[in-house]
Amino acid sequence: MSADLPDETPGFDLGAPSAPTAATPYRVLARKYRPQNFTDLIGQEAMVRTLSNAFASGRIAQAYILTGVRGVGKTTTARILARALNYEPMEGGGGPSLDLSVMGRHCRDIIESRHVDVMEMDAASNTSINDIREIIEGSRYRPAMARYKVYIIDEVHMLSTAAFNGLLKTLEEPPEHVKFVFATTEIRKV
Protein backbone atom coordinates (compact mmCIF):
# COMPACT_ATOMS: atom_id res chain seq x y z
CA MET A 1 0.00 0.00 0.00
CA SER A 2 1.10 3.53 -0.61
CA ALA A 3 1.93 5.95 2.21
CA ASP A 4 -0.78 8.42 1.21
CA LEU A 5 -3.68 6.15 2.17
CA PRO A 6 -5.59 7.25 5.28
CA ASP A 7 -5.16 3.97 7.16
CA GLU A 8 -1.38 4.33 7.02
CA THR A 9 -1.35 7.96 8.09
CA PRO A 10 -0.11 8.30 11.68
CA GLY A 11 -2.90 9.24 14.09
CA PHE A 12 -5.66 8.30 11.63
CA ASP A 13 -7.44 5.06 12.48
CA LEU A 14 -10.38 3.70 10.51
CA GLY A 15 -10.70 0.71 12.81
CA ALA A 16 -13.43 0.07 15.33
CA PRO A 17 -15.03 3.14 16.88
CA SER A 18 -13.79 4.06 20.31
CA ALA A 19 -15.79 2.92 23.30
CA PRO A 20 -18.33 5.46 24.53
CA THR A 21 -17.20 7.48 27.50
CA ALA A 22 -19.08 7.83 30.76
CA ALA A 23 -22.57 9.31 30.66
CA THR A 24 -21.34 12.90 30.58
CA PRO A 25 -23.89 14.89 28.61
CA TYR A 26 -22.51 17.15 25.95
CA ARG A 27 -22.96 20.83 26.69
CA VAL A 28 -22.07 23.75 24.49
CA LEU A 29 -19.08 25.64 25.86
CA ALA A 30 -21.12 28.82 26.39
CA ARG A 31 -23.63 26.90 28.53
CA LYS A 32 -21.01 24.94 30.40
CA TYR A 33 -19.27 28.09 31.63
CA ARG A 34 -22.34 30.32 31.88
CA PRO A 35 -22.22 32.45 35.06
CA GLN A 36 -24.41 31.13 37.89
CA ASN A 37 -24.11 34.07 40.29
CA PHE A 38 -23.05 37.70 40.41
CA THR A 39 -19.43 36.93 41.32
CA ASP A 40 -19.07 34.98 38.06
CA LEU A 41 -20.08 38.00 35.95
CA ILE A 42 -17.06 39.64 34.38
CA GLY A 43 -16.99 43.40 33.83
CA GLN A 44 -20.28 44.09 35.62
CA GLU A 45 -18.95 45.42 38.93
CA ALA A 46 -20.92 48.69 38.72
CA MET A 47 -24.21 46.88 38.12
CA VAL A 48 -23.54 44.41 40.94
CA ARG A 49 -22.67 47.29 43.30
CA THR A 50 -25.87 49.14 42.36
CA LEU A 51 -27.97 46.02 42.95
CA SER A 52 -26.15 45.36 46.21
CA ASN A 53 -27.00 48.86 47.46
CA ALA A 54 -30.63 48.47 46.38
CA PHE A 55 -30.98 45.09 48.10
CA ALA A 56 -29.26 46.35 51.28
CA SER A 57 -31.54 49.40 51.52
CA GLY A 58 -34.67 47.43 50.64
CA ARG A 59 -35.33 49.64 47.60
CA ILE A 60 -35.73 47.00 44.93
CA ALA A 61 -37.07 48.43 41.67
CA GLN A 62 -40.15 47.04 39.95
CA ALA A 63 -38.33 46.84 36.62
CA TYR A 64 -34.77 46.59 35.39
CA ILE A 65 -33.49 47.04 31.86
CA LEU A 66 -30.29 45.39 30.68
CA THR A 67 -28.69 46.58 27.49
CA GLY A 68 -25.64 45.61 25.49
CA VAL A 69 -24.46 43.96 22.31
CA ARG A 70 -25.54 40.46 21.34
CA GLY A 71 -23.89 37.75 23.41
CA VAL A 72 -22.75 39.96 26.30
CA GLY A 73 -24.88 38.09 28.86
CA LYS A 74 -28.07 40.10 29.29
CA THR A 75 -30.38 37.10 29.52
CA THR A 76 -27.98 35.23 31.79
CA THR A 77 -27.79 38.28 34.06
CA ALA A 78 -31.59 38.51 34.05
CA ARG A 79 -31.81 34.88 35.22
CA ILE A 80 -29.26 35.53 37.97
CA LEU A 81 -31.27 38.60 39.03
CA ALA A 82 -34.47 36.51 39.12
CA ARG A 83 -32.65 34.00 41.28
CA ALA A 84 -31.39 36.75 43.63
CA LEU A 85 -34.86 38.29 43.97
CA ASN A 86 -36.37 34.93 44.89
CA TYR A 87 -33.44 33.59 46.92
CA GLU A 88 -34.52 31.63 49.96
CA PRO A 89 -32.17 29.37 51.92
CA MET A 90 -33.11 25.69 52.09
CA GLU A 91 -33.98 26.07 55.76
CA GLY A 92 -36.35 28.94 54.93
CA GLY A 93 -36.43 32.60 55.88
CA GLY A 94 -34.24 35.30 54.45
CA GLY A 95 -34.93 37.82 51.74
CA PRO A 96 -33.52 38.82 48.38
CA SER A 97 -29.77 38.27 48.35
CA LEU A 98 -26.84 38.77 46.02
CA ASP A 99 -24.92 36.04 47.83
CA LEU A 100 -25.89 33.02 45.76
CA SER A 101 -22.91 30.85 46.70
CA VAL A 102 -25.19 28.32 48.43
CA MET A 103 -28.08 26.89 46.43
CA GLY A 104 -31.42 28.07 47.71
CA ARG A 105 -34.88 26.57 47.58
CA HIS A 106 -35.75 27.91 44.09
CA CYS A 107 -32.26 28.18 42.58
CA ARG A 108 -32.08 24.91 40.62
CA ASP A 109 -35.47 25.45 38.97
CA ILE A 110 -34.63 29.04 38.01
CA ILE A 111 -31.22 28.04 36.60
CA GLU A 112 -32.88 25.31 34.53
CA SER A 113 -35.61 27.74 33.32
CA ARG A 114 -38.43 25.67 34.75
CA HIS A 115 -39.60 27.70 37.74
CA VAL A 116 -43.31 28.45 37.68
CA ASP A 117 -42.88 32.04 38.94
CA VAL A 118 -40.06 33.07 36.59
CA MET A 119 -41.29 33.48 33.04
CA GLU A 120 -39.15 34.26 30.02
CA MET A 121 -40.52 35.68 26.81
CA ASP A 122 -38.59 36.29 23.62
CA ALA A 123 -40.11 39.48 22.28
CA ALA A 124 -38.49 38.88 18.90
CA SER A 125 -40.97 36.08 18.22
CA ASN A 126 -43.81 37.18 20.54
CA THR A 127 -44.41 40.77 19.49
CA SER A 128 -48.18 41.11 19.63
CA ILE A 129 -50.49 42.70 22.17
CA ASN A 130 -51.99 39.26 22.86
CA ASP A 131 -48.62 38.02 24.13
CA ILE A 132 -48.41 41.00 26.49
CA ARG A 133 -52.01 40.48 27.61
CA GLU A 134 -51.00 37.03 28.85
CA ILE A 135 -48.29 38.65 30.99
CA ILE A 136 -50.69 41.31 32.28
CA GLU A 137 -53.27 38.66 33.14
CA GLY A 138 -50.68 36.48 34.87
CA SER A 139 -49.29 39.39 36.87
CA ARG A 140 -52.60 39.80 38.68
CA TYR A 141 -52.05 36.58 40.60
CA ARG A 142 -49.59 36.13 43.43
CA PRO A 143 -46.58 33.85 42.94
CA ALA A 144 -47.24 30.15 43.49
CA MET A 145 -43.95 29.29 45.21
CA ALA A 146 -41.46 32.16 45.21
CA ARG A 147 -41.40 35.66 46.68
CA TYR A 148 -41.84 37.45 43.35
CA LYS A 149 -43.16 36.68 39.91
CA VAL A 150 -40.35 37.69 37.60
CA TYR A 151 -41.01 38.33 33.93
CA ILE A 152 -37.89 38.34 31.76
CA ILE A 153 -38.62 39.89 28.38
CA ASP A 154 -35.72 39.41 26.00
CA GLU A 155 -35.27 41.69 22.98
CA VAL A 156 -37.96 44.00 24.37
CA HIS A 157 -37.34 46.53 21.59
CA MET A 158 -39.06 44.14 19.16
CA LEU A 159 -42.49 44.54 20.80
CA SER A 160 -45.13 46.23 18.69
CA THR A 161 -46.35 49.72 19.64
CA ALA A 162 -49.66 48.26 20.81
CA ALA A 163 -47.80 45.74 22.98
CA PHE A 164 -45.67 48.51 24.53
CA ASN A 165 -48.77 50.56 25.27
CA GLY A 166 -50.49 47.54 26.80
CA LEU A 167 -47.52 46.90 29.07
CA LEU A 168 -47.18 50.55 30.08
CA LYS A 169 -50.12 50.56 32.51
CA THR A 170 -48.75 47.52 34.36
CA LEU A 171 -45.28 49.08 34.48
CA GLU A 172 -46.62 52.35 35.87
CA GLU A 173 -48.64 50.66 38.61
CA PRO A 174 -47.18 47.16 39.03
CA PRO A 175 -48.40 44.77 41.70
CA GLU A 176 -45.91 44.55 44.58
CA HIS A 177 -45.26 40.85 43.90
CA VAL A 178 -44.18 41.36 40.26
CA LYS A 179 -40.75 42.32 38.92
CA PHE A 180 -39.82 42.87 35.28
CA VAL A 181 -36.39 42.40 33.74
CA PHE A 182 -36.03 43.66 30.19
CA ALA A 183 -33.09 42.87 27.93
CA THR A 184 -32.38 44.69 24.68
CA THR A 185 -29.67 45.33 22.14
CA GLU A 186 -31.41 48.50 20.93
CA ILE A 187 -32.00 50.78 23.92
CA ARG A 188 -32.97 53.69 21.63
CA LYS A 189 -36.01 51.76 20.40
CA VAL A 190 -37.46 51.24 23.88
Image: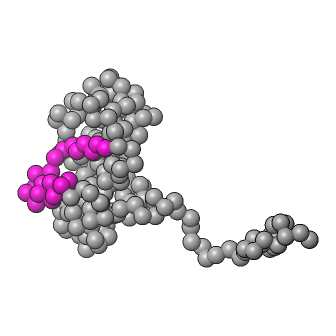
Asked whether the viewer can see residue 86, the reply is no
Residue 64's x, y, as percent?
A: 22, 44
Residue at the far front: name it.
3
Q: Is residue 84 above or below residue 13?
A: above
Report the front residue among 139 and 159: 159
Q: Residue at x 36, y 38 (%)?
A: 155
Residue at the far right: name it: 1
Q: Position of residue 109 (x, y in %)?
A: 39, 60
For image coordinates 19% across by 44% down, the residue present is 62
> Is residue 64 located in the magenta-colored stretch of the structure?
yes
Taking the view exactly as shown, the residue that stands out farthest to the top is 162
User: Is 40 part of what is drawn in magenta?
Assistant: no
Residue at x 17% of width, y 33% of height? 172
Residue 30 lies left or right of residue 23; in this view the side is left
Which quarter of the image is occupied by the N terminus? bottom right
The residue lying toward the viewer, choosing from 94 and 80, is: 80
Q: Residue at x 37, y 31 (%)?
A: 158
Quarter the C terminus occupies:
top left
All told, the count of numbered labels is: 0
Q: Is residue 133 above or below residue 143?
A: above
- Image coordinates of residue 38 in percent, x first then y, are 26, 62
Q: Judge whether residue 72 can be spotted in this image.
A: yes
In this picture the colour scheme is: one colour
Indicate left or right for 26 with 128 as reference: right
Whole-percent x, y for residue 142 in the image: 26, 48
Q: Is residue 27 left or right of residue 183?
A: right
Q: As displayed, is residue 83 above or below residue 176?
A: below
* Span shown in magenta: 46-68
